[in-house]
Image (cartoon, rainbow, N blue to C red):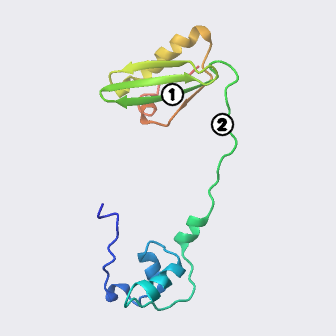
Amino acid sequence: MSNLVPSLAISSAELGRNSMKRWHEILRHCNISDVLKLENVVVDGMKTTDKANFGCDVCTLGKLTQFRNISPDARAFAPLELVHTWQVQSAQLLKISFIDDYSGVKFLYFLKQKRDTVAATERFLADVAPHGDVKRLRSDNGTEFTSNFGTFSIR
């Protein structure tokens, strides 16, 4: 935790000119009016120079709004049109699940090793083949689908 909290015991030599911008940075981008209150009311001997307004890129970026996707992702309109999958490891169990987006039907397969993902996916596709073909398979971008999937494809 000590590496997360900066030390405020900084000598005047380290501060350079004791500029307002430097104090703003030391105090984790505290607003200027609060830094002035510290100097005038709370802290004895705190002197700042260069009290002119300055631009702080970190504060400007922090005030920008982020883009929010308000439209939901496309949902499936038929069984097996979209199947979500992810791999979970809890305790000593490694499992992969497949969930049909349309019906909510869940398939769960237990794995011995992470590299058994391809075999479990092939087994899932064989299990649902009598009901139709999987159109899209969506994963959580885990590494389980990046190593041994070179020869595998959904037809």
Please name whichever residue, 125 or 68, is drawn nearer the observer in this view of the structure. 68
Is residue 152 visible from the viewing direction of this image?
no
Q: Amino acid at mark 2?
A: Asp
Is disc 2 placed on a helix, strand or loop? loop
Category of crowding for the residue at label 2, using alpha-carbon neighbours closer than 10 angstroms: few (below 14), some (14–19), many (at least 20): few
Q: Measured from the top left, where is residue 17 in percent x and y? A: 41, 90
Q: Measured from the top left, where is residue 40 in percent x and y? A: 46, 88
Q: Earlier in the sequence, mark 2 or mark 1?
A: 2
Is residue 102 visible from the viewing direction of this image?
yes
Is disc 1 placed on a helix, strand or loop? strand
Disc 2: which residue: 73
Q: Which mark is residue 36?
A: none
Residue located at (52% from left, 89% from top): 51
Question: In the image, is residue 43 above or below residue 105?
Answer: below
Please name whichever residue, 39 or 108, is drawn nearer the observer in this view of the structure. 39
Residue located at (47% from left, 92% from top): 49
Q: Which quadrant does the N terminus fall into?
A: bottom left
Q: Measured from the top left, where is residue 57 in percent x and y? A: 55, 72
Question: In the image, is residue 111 above or below residue 66?
Answer: above
Q: Amino acid at mark 1?
A: Thr
Category of crowding for the residue at label 1, using alpha-carbon neighbours closer than 10 angstroms: few (below 14), some (14–19), many (at least 20): many
Residue located at (32% from left, 89% from top): 13
Q: Measured from the top left, where is residue 55 in percent x and y? A: 57, 79
Question: In the image, is residue 2 above or below residue 144?
Answer: below
Disc 1: which residue: 85
Residue located at (50% from left, 79% from top): 34
Q: Is residue 47 left or right of residue 103?
A: left
Q: Which quadrant does the C terminus fall into?
A: top right
Question: Which quadrant of the figure has residue 38?
Answer: bottom left
CA gap, disc 2 and disc 1: 16 Å
Please name whichever residue, 3 or 139, is drawn nearer the observer in this view of the structure. 3
